[in-house]
Amino acid sequence: MNTFSLREAGRSFDAWEKIIKNSLDIICTVDREGYFVNVNEASKTVIGYESGELAGKHFQHFIHPHDLEPTKAVVREVVKGLDTKNFRNRYIHRSGEEVLLLWSAVWSEEEEVLLCVGRDITEQKQVRRKLREKEELYKALIEHGSDMLALFDEELNFIFSGPSTARELGYEPEQLVGTNGLQYVHPEDVQKIESSLHQLLHSQEQVKVPEFRFKDAWGGWRWMETIGSNQLHNPAVRAIVASSRDITERVESRIELKEGHQRFQSLFEHHLDIVLFQDREGIIADVNAATLSYFKLQKETLLNQPLSNFLSAEVVNDFKQGLRHSLEGKPVHFVSFLPFREKKQDIFDIVKVPVVVNEVIVGVYCIFRNITELIHSNTTIKTQAEKLNAVLESVTDSFFTLDRNWRFTYMNSEFERLVGVERKELLGKNVWELSQEMLGREFYQEFHSATESAKAVHFETYYKRLEKWMEVKAFPSEEGLSVFINDITERMESRQELEKLSLVASRTTNGVVITNPNGFTEWVNEGFTKLTGYTFPEVEGKLLGPILMGEETDRTTSERLAERWKQNKPFSDEILNYKKSGEKVWIWLDVTPVLDDDGEVVKVVSIQTDITDRKEAEALQLQMTRDLYRQNTDLQQFTYIVSHNLRSPVANVMGLAELLTIVDKNSETFETSLGYLQKGAHQLDFVLRDLNQILTIRNKKGTTVNEKVEVRLVFQQVMATLQESLNDCQGEVNMIIDEGVGVRGNKAYLYSIFYNLLSNSLKYRSPDRKLKVTVKCVSRPESEGVFIYFSDNGIGFDMQAVGDNLFKMYKRFHHHYEGRGIGLFLVKTHVEAMDGYIEVNSQQNRGTTFLIYLKKP
Amino acid sequence: MKIFIIDDEEVSLFLSQRMLLIQEEDAEISLFLSAEKALKVLREGKPEDSPDVILLDINMPVIDGWKFLEHFTSMEELIQRKCSIYVLTSSLDASDEEAVKNHPSVTSIIHKPLKIEDIKLLFSHS
């Protein structure tokens, strides 16, 4: 305010004066009492009075009487300092018309006046009123109309949502405004809406949106139909106006109808039975797929034909009657055997269903169900049941079944006999109503145990009524209990008998074994355990053969036993068995089959006796027999020697003695004969000596001294003895014998062996070459024996011609050589006396090689 | 009378020869120490020169009496018909005697030593 100069203030005042003067609004000052002080010129145009006519006058003369009191009240308020800016009241124009004025007023304390500005708002208000009247109409339409109204922007965001939307779909307007309309649309329908929106944005026409699904506030889908109008360019609206209607019911009922039809079609078409539609005249109007496949015909062939064309003559009337009944509305259901001309073997169950349209029967659906297999399987089941019945009747076991309430549902005749009651009296009765005598306490317990545990039970019981032992087997099932009762009296009696026998058998020292007819062990006594080492549990239910027989058990014996076993007759045999310990035991078997009344074997009793001692004695005897045989053979050979070699010089001596008595003592013959006689006597002596030597060796066999004999040493002694002969023929001996190598035996024997072999080499040396003898001794550490190779380059012999006579006594193979045929015989005898063996190989005019095997010491 | 004596023993040959000569001075006796030699003579000589009697020992090395008999049976029929074979053996073995008796080519068996009675019988047969 300091800078506010007077000049400026004056200029400002002039400006204000002009503004006030020219203002269209009434500008005036009024005192606290309500009298006008100053009024500008606008009063003339607004209320028809000059400013001068108003000054000094109270406003009450110009204000509408209804508004006077409120105006006074406002004035009082303003005077107190409360400004007002929008107070309305009505003045009466000079012409008498009401003028509505809008006032702003302020109290000026300095001047003590009200500064007031009043504007004529009469026209404005009228426009607004009309507008309001229209708004209310729309409002009523919006609020109470059934259509849902909404405004969207060009992107389909809600700008406005009417209350009917809240009513219909559950969304309050504020829930929707600001959200996008598309988010409520069913995904499958979004495209539809988008294309409608596109259409709407590019035309001024109304667009009808085809039916689409809109999600309601409860999550359900509602079918909607909407009419949209593009009002984006209308300044009063600036929105897309959409009016929607819920058409869910309409759409759904339409869909249901469609589905219903489809369902029916599908049912008809895919029905597994033959279904065909006949009109009132019996003409086939439609058939399903099953029909076509059954007849293997095209649809055209069947349509428009009377059904009777396909029927066999015998059934045509049945079907006509069926059609007639059906058309009368009666239920039709019948079974027809072989109705079709073709396909004669089939049986059908037929239902005819009338079709009613507008209360008129227009035709009949015929459903043919093929029941051929059903009929046949029923027949099969029936025959099987009959067979089963026959089987159950024929079995010797008693048989009955109980339901879950212990009532008899079935029994065979055998059971009737057992309890002595007829089945008609028992069927349906509770089994426990039978007297204790018939089915006692044991049955009760066992049967309950079977049903409770759902497991079969098996027990033996004494049936007092018939004095018989019974074996009972009861099998629980869903239906109840199946029970078999078997008479085992005989078995029980034989078992008891067996138990008694067992008592006796268990006391004997022999092994007693009881088996079933197939050889499986049922019982053994203690004697058996003592004899074999096997206890009863170890052999129970097993075949004894594989357990007891062993490596040295004679196979033919075991086969013979098996063969004799099969003949079902008592027999005895002996066999080598093995105890559990592996020890051998010879067993004498007495096998006795036990027969039943029909001659069938029921048991086999075997009694086992230990005959090991006897068998050992037999074995000893056998050995003795063998020795005897050998000695006998020797004796035979001895006889041979005697008959040939001893007899030969004897015969000579005898002959010569005879000759000497005949011929002249002085003749040459006499001299010669005498010389021969002397020679013959010597020869005789040789043979006797030989025999003596051989017999000595034979007798000593087995008692040969088992000393260690050094091979090299002995051979050197032999060489020394025969050195002269070797020197005479300039023979050469190559000795390859390690020092210390020994054999087990007798030194004299080994000497005899080498002496005889070397003598032979000398005797049978080749006249064409110098004698060479090689003696080689091989002693391998791993071997139990020693090999001696003795070879020469002599005349040899024909292996084939000599055969097995080489080592025989008094066998000679060469002429012109001195020899008694005893050397090699002695060699062999000596080698064998020392538990060795000798082999020979020879080639004529090449030489001979002997191989001698002797045991190490 | 032509006689072959086959024996590997010299003493035996000597004895048989002497005894035969004592009984029959004109006997033409050939002695063989081995069967091979006797066979050779039989094969090489003319059939009509073959002996009337052969005294054959059994127990000989290389070719014994049995083998000699085998060879003999494969010779010309004329020889076989002409020769009477007597087995002269020292054996007392009954089995030998049985075998000799059953042999078709053997006339008889004579046990050594050859005695006067044997020779008489022999000549009466031939």
Image (cartoon, rainbow, N blue to C red):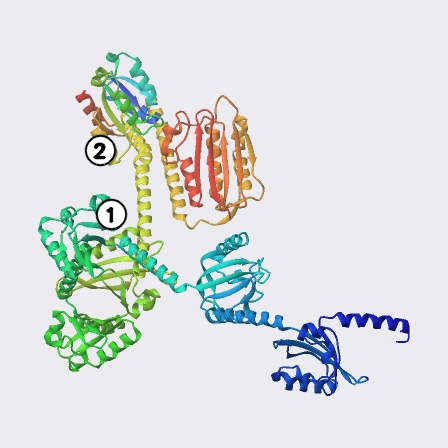
Q: How far from the left and from the top, in percent, is residue A826?
A: 42, 39
Q: Is residue A666 visible?
A: no
The image quadrant where one finds the N terminus of chain B is top left
Q: Is residue A99 above or below residue A855?
A: below
Q: Is residue A815 something that shows in the picture?
A: yes
Q: Estimate the x, y position of residue A278 in percent, counting from the top left.
A: 19, 52
Vertical position of residue A63 compared to residue A516: above or below: below
The three-letter amino acid code for the residue at tag 1 is Ser
Query: Foreground: A71 or A802?
Result: A71
Judging by the rendered image, the residue that carries numbered circle 1 is A293
Q: Nearer the viewer, residue A120 or A796?
A: A120
Instruction: Give the residue pinned by disc 2.
Output: B98
Q: Which mark is residue A475?
A: none
Find numbered disc 2 in the image and state the secondary structure of the residue it sits on: helix
Q: Nearer the viewer, residue A517 or B118?
A: A517
Chain letter for mark 1: A
Residue A537 position within the rendered picture, expressed as x and y whole percent measured from the top left: 33, 68
* Closer to the eye: label 1 or 2: 1
Q: Residue at x 45, y 28 (%)?
A: A764
Asked whether A193 or A584 is in front, the reply is A193
Local crowd size for mark 1, using a 10 Å CA cut-off: few (<14), some (14–19), many (≥20): few
Secondary structure at numbered mark 1: helix
Q: Is residue A193 above or below residue A249?
A: above
Instruction: Give, as a three-letter code, the residue at label 2.
Output: Glu
Which residue does the image show at 38% across and 44% down from the upper left? A695
Labels 1, 2: one chain: no
